[in-house]
Every structure is written in C-alpha cells, then in structure tokens.
Amino acid sequence: MRYRFADFMLSPQRRLLVREGREVPLIPRYFDLLLLLIEQRNVAVQRREIFDRVWAGVTVSESALSQAVRTLRRTLDDDPREPRFIRTVSRHGYQFVFPGVIEEADDASWPVGGDAARTGPAGAPVGIRMDADLAAPRWTRAAAGAAIAGLAAGGLGGMILAAAPGSAAPIALAPVLAVIGAACGAIGGAGVGAGLALAEAAAYSPRALALTFGGAIGGGLVGAAVQWLTRWGLASLVGLDIAVGGGLEGLFIGAAAGLGYAIATTRLLTSDGTDGHASSGRAWLARVVLTATLCGLAGLSLTLTGRPLAGGTIHAIAAAAEGSQATLAPLGRLIGEPDFGPVTGAILAFGEAAMFGLGLAVGLLRRLRSANGPVSPVISDTH
C-alpha cells in the first residue's frame, strides 16, 4: 500500500515521499520512521519500538530520535506546538495524528513528475539521499580530530628525533613536523570523513560494507591528490624525483577507518544489551581504540609491503636532499637498528596510522560521553 495525506504521498515500494508531484529527499532511516508512524497511526509508538524497528542493530541515543523527528517535522512543515502530523507523547513516544490518511494500492500508476519518477531496481530511488546540515558537522569533526592527532604526532616525533643520540635535528624541527602532521591529518580526515558521511546516507547498502567502501574511496581520492601534488612539487621546486605514496595508502587506511567506525557504532561494543547505549567510558574508549588499531594495522601492512607513510616519505626526501637534518636514521639507532630500517618503519607506520584513526574516531564520537549520560553522535548526526 501507499499512503496519501494532505499534499503528500508516501510509497514504501518505491521508498519515496512525494509532495505535489515532486520528490522530497529523506535519509533512509528517517523515511523508515515516517513509514512506521503512519502504519501505526492509531496508537502512540513507544520510543523503544522505534529504536528496535528503525535503528535495529545500531547504537543510538535519544538525540538521534529527536533529530529525526525534527527533520520530519521540518520536511512536512509541521509545528510541534500545534502538530498537524507528528505529536509528541510525553515520556512515551510519538504518534502520527493527521486524520485523513488514504491507503491505496501502490501499483504501476504513479502520477508524479520530475525527479520523483527516477527510480532504480525494485523501485529504489536513484542516487544518495543526504541531509547536508547533518553531513557537514561530521565532515568537520573528522577533519579536526585527525588534524589534532597529526599535530600531536608530528610535534612529539620531532622532539624525540631532536633528542635521539647522534641526531643533528634541531628542536625547531618539532613545530615543522607538527604542521606537516596537522596538514596531513586534516586532509586525510576530511577525505575519509566525507566518504563516511556519504556512505552513511547511501540508500540501499549494508552499513558496514558501505562505510568501509566510503572510507576507502574518500581516503583514496585525497591520497591520490596529495601524492600527485607532492611529486609535482618536489620535482618542480627542488628537482627531486621521489616515488611517494598516497592513493593506495589512503585507500587502505580509509577502508580500515570505515570498518572500525562501522563496528564501533553498532551494539557489538556496548555494555548494555537492553537499549544499545554505552553505559561507561570504557565502551567509548573501546570504540576509539578499535578504530585506531585497525588503522594502525593497515599502516603496518602497507609498510611491510614496501609502501611507507608520511614518516618514511620524509626520511626518503631527507636522504635524497643534500644537507637535510630531517633524516630519521637516529630513530632507527634509538630502536636498535643501524639506520632507518624495516622495524623502525613498521613501528612508525603503525603509530602514524593509529594516531590518525584515533583522532578521526574521537572527532566523530566526541559527543558519545556527556554529563547526562552516553550519547552516540555518529548515529545522531546521520540517522
């Protein structure tokens, strides 16, 4: 069946909300919520049932549901003070209260025009449904979190390098490496964050697969762009032709970040099996550590196959540039190798990628803990 109410039509088969012949884009979970409220419009639907039906298998908070209802009301031009469509039932849930809902067969006839007629296989809408107001904060948090992590990692690495026995690197190298780390983190975080935001809003994909794929594509694209710019810049400015990485590295680490983020925002890591909410800071920490660890393992695997990350690239550039003080050979000697060897490269790559994943996860999950209890910002912002 499809449903007509006021000047709207809701088609479960085509997963479309149409107003006066024009499609009204909705994030998939918001569509599911509206459909649930309309199907059970004779009763007030409890919050727990909404969570179980609309957000099944995903960690969510009350703010996720509140955001969804606000968006639906804005979409339907509904006033919460004088609700025409969605009424809040205090301490219980929500009810769809429009009295003139008409049910009719969702057959081949589809009296709409414009974009509303664009459907894919089995009536699935073509393209991605995205609420830009929700995607932008996620993208910003991901970039900011990764930038801060890169800043800390670069600065700390510079200080360790300056203090290493036999190092000629001045302490002034620390802020330089901090700036480089922050820039790399911000660019990588923005790319992966954008991929995750798009994947979260993608219509008909398994969530874990979509997030892994989205993170990989976002990381790969920005990595390839940075790779090209770096090689071009080195060749044109200082005459160095060095094989630097970027695209494949971004692809692998972005995929690891997406997978870790997908696992971290399901009920798999929650300590409360009844409502899917994390009940302690340990659960929040587990989410962050999981994403960081998967990213670190991705970085380690890349280095073991001969593809260094930022630290290894800096060392290669310093080794090729005459008189450079940024060589990381003292770090190798600090670890016990005669030079910047495979063990040093592996440790450095794991740490770099793990720090990136840590910053990304903290940025995305920064509101998971609040003074009034746990909140899941990842799901709140998108679903």
Image (tube, rainbow, N blue to C red):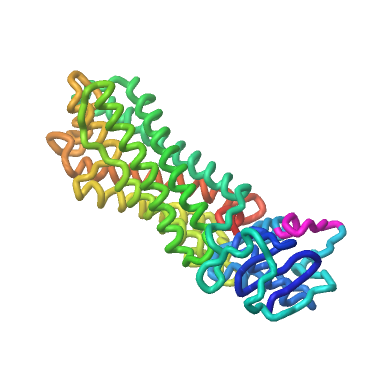
Which quarter of the image is occupied by the N terminus?
A: bottom right
Q: Is residue 105 above or below residue 298?
A: below
Place of residue 243 in the rendered image (x, y in percent of width and height, measured from the top left): 21, 36
As for residue 83 lying within the magenta part, the answer is no
As for residue 77 lying within the magenta part, the answer is yes
Residue 122 shows in the view:
yes
Say whether residue 178 is left or right of residue 46. left
Q: Residue furthest right?
A: 82
Place of residue 121 in the rendered image (x, y in percent of width and height, measured from the top left): 50, 71
Residue 62 shows in the view:
no
Say whether residue 25 is left or right of residue 162. right
Q: Residue at x 33, y 32 (%)?
A: 229
- Specify the quadrant of the image occupied by residue 168: top left
Please tell me which residue lies in front, 55 or 92: 55
Q: Residue at x 22, y 41 (%)?
A: 345
Q: Is residue 65 above or below residue 194?
A: below
Say whether residue 251 is left or right of residue 201. left
Q: Residue at x 18, y 20 (%)?
A: 322
Write down the region rendered in magenta. 72-81
Please tell me which residue lies in front, 247 or 360: 247
